[in-house]
Amino acid sequence: MIPMSEREPSDVAKKLLELAEKFGQIELENVQVVVEELTLQLQPTIAATRGVAALQPSAAKPMDRLLEAEFVKPLEVYPGQVAEVQLGATRSEGGTRSVAVRIGGARVPPFYSFEGANPNRPAFAMDVFDMPLTLPKAIRQHYEGVMDDPAAWAKKSVREFGADIISFNLISTDPGLKNTGAEDAAQTVRDVLNAVDVPIIIGGSGNKEKDPVVLEKAAEAAHGERVLLNSVSTDTDYKRVVKAALEHGHSVVAFTPMDINNQKKLNRLLLDAGLPKDRLVIDPTTAALGYGIEYSISLLERIKLAALKGDPELQMPILSAASNAWGAREAWMKTEELGPREYRGPLWETVTGLTMMMSGADLFMISHPATVRVLRGLVDSLFGIGETDQKIEDWITAIE
């Protein structure tokens, strides 16, 4: 057989044509062709019988319309579900609340109505303290005359500002403040429960040694009312609080400082201590607008998605302290170029709350009445409740 390198170009072309006619296609491997000019010409019969494309430009007309195809929504199916937690017990349930509030129960990410409907709306708790404290003027002006009376403060929050829940904070028990005893704190809890008929969150002062004692007595004072005890962490006597919650029918907040692994660890400890998943709310920490809020966004989204994907150690409703926004000096400091503090502070808290709500939070602690009003209106809109004349083209106004 004569090597290809020694053959005439015409012989090579003839051989290629023969192969193309016989097999309809040819494939060359490890071949190097060095020629000045190579022309392949197929007979018309080959093109007709073997389906070899003609070497002439296509004369087909361009399409005048798109091909029709059915659109199928790319819907995600989530195997997991967030536990549902009830706050408050009605009279038929052994408590004295006029209404109970349910949070959690999510099967899809927040407001993914195109994938499914979550059973419960976000809920809003307004902050009340057991002693007067230094608050920004934008908040303080709404509570003038009641800050010395926690029961009156709570009543005003419900009747005038529409609080779904009262977040009652026993800050006077801090040894660095009044060092109020646990028994006296428990009596104040009873006063607030008698003043309002909405569910209650009971918080301590943040003192790791004293809070378990205070929350234990508060749980006893609120027996049967299904309050939310706020909070426990890995470095507190969480077993003492869990025991009190189980004895008196309450739920517990698990607080961790922005670490998903620590949150899982604490949740696991509480579950192992006997606290059911439907009696546990987690607080992975809310960073304020402009003060690391992007970290909270990432953390809440990771927790919520992990829960929906089936992680049992993260399938709990999320608490967000939107009122942390007032810790940002831009929310309250007197700086003319930033605009009036009366608007700036509530906006700072509102944007913080809205961001956390979109990231997966279920329950919010809020200080300013306007924040509650705006966030509730946004939730109504997102759930398709109520009517509005607002047109989408009016949402953005061009300024010349």
Image (spheres, rainbow, N blue to C red):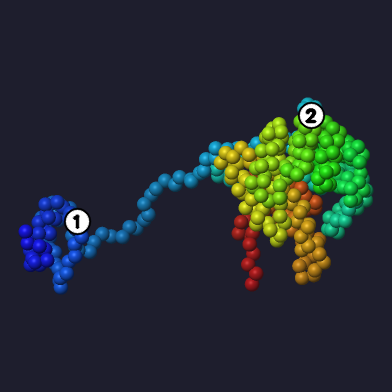
Q: What x and y, as percent, mark residue 352?
A: 71, 55
Report the number of numbered marks.
2
> Residue placed at 69% from the left, 41% from the top?
266
How many other residues sit within 10 Å of disc 2, few (<14), some (14-19) or many (≥20)? Answer: few
Q: Is residue 139 visible?
A: yes
Name the quadrant of the N terminus. Answer: bottom left
Which of the two residues, 255 or 334, is positioned nearer the viewer here?
A: 255
Task: Tell me which label, 2 or 1, sits earlier in the chain.
Answer: 1
Is residue 9 depicted above or below 307 in this figure? below
> Residue placed at 92% from the left, 39% from the top?
184
**What amino acid type is highlighted by mark number 2?**
Glu
Name the quadrant of the C terminus. Answer: bottom right
Q: Which mark is residue 27?
A: 1
Q: Which mark is residue 247?
A: 2
Are the residues flagged by discs 2 and 1 in contact, CB closer than 8 Å?
A: no
Which of the two residues, 207 or 370, is positioned nearer the viewer here?
A: 207
